[in-house]
Image (spheres, helix red, strand yellow):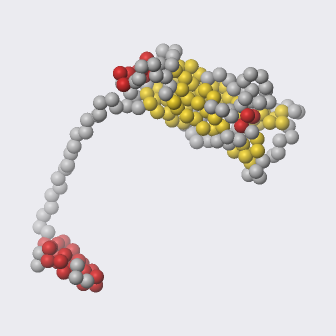
Amino acid sequence: MNARSILTRAAAGVAGGVLLLGVAGTAFAEDQKDAGDVAVEVAISELPGGGALSMSVAGTSTALSENGSTSTVRQFTGTLPTVTVTDTRDPADIPQGAGWYVLGTASDFVSSAGDVIGAENLGWAPRLIDGGDSGLVAEGDVVDTAIDGGPNGVGLVDQELLAITNDSAAISSEGSWTADAALTLKTPAEVEAGNYTSTLTLSLFE
């Protein structure tokens, strides 16, 4: 009985199918005399215009610790995980006049009890770790907290600049650049105690 006949009879009923398939499997195993492997290979070339502009962050969280508090203001500091921008594109594929930049914005801090510290109370001081040899990548300005006041005292409520270049094509051969930022949270001394969490969203644009 060949395999086609076995499969045809297997279709005649569920109970018979189970039995017949079991027998067929045994028969195939017993009748096999030899075996051989065939390696299947394919060479896939890189598409023209390959490469991409991308960003990675060396961590999904960071913790702020109390540091430098006074009788009227409590201060908590920490460091943004290192942000890396990578460009693997051919300079010829980058639009003329294009430049990339990384922005950051924070949500309000909310405690497990539901207490809220506004995002305007979180500021940062961007820092280039590796801006490349060209000098064409710059860090963003310091953003102070609302408690600091002044022209930069807006906190990370809106999208604030971490790093920027005005000429993606000119620096693409450098490959990658890194930056981080010193983070500072300032609150009134009478802030409610608790474990607070905020989300700082980083975005790469060109």
Q: Position of residue 70 (x, y in %)?
A: 85, 31
Is 9 above or below relative to 70? below
Is 119 above or below relative to 151? below
Q: Is residue 117 visible?
A: yes
Q: Residue at x 29, y 34 (%)?
A: 46
Q: Is residue 89 left or right of residue 78?
A: left
Q: Which quarter shows the N terminus?
A: bottom left
Residue placed furthest toward the front:
96
Q: Is residue 84 visible?
A: no
Q: Residue at x 15, y 73 (%)?
A: 3
Q: Is residue 115 left or right of residue 107?
A: right
Q: Residue at x 56, y 19 (%)?
A: 138
Tally the numbered discs: 0
Splitting the image into 4 quarters, where does residue 6 fall?
Answer: bottom left
Q: Is residue 129 left or right of residue 144?
A: left
Is 163 above or below relative to 31? above
Q: Residue at x 46, y 33 (%)?
A: 54
Q: Position of residue 111 (x, y in %)?
A: 74, 48
Q: Nearer the viewer, residue 37 or 58?
A: 58
Q: Position of residue 5 (x, y in %)?
A: 14, 77
Q: Position of residue 155 (x, y in %)?
A: 71, 31
Q: Nearer the viewer, residue 194 or 106?
A: 106
Q: Nearer the viewer, residue 1 or 129?
A: 1
Residue placed furthest toward the right:
71
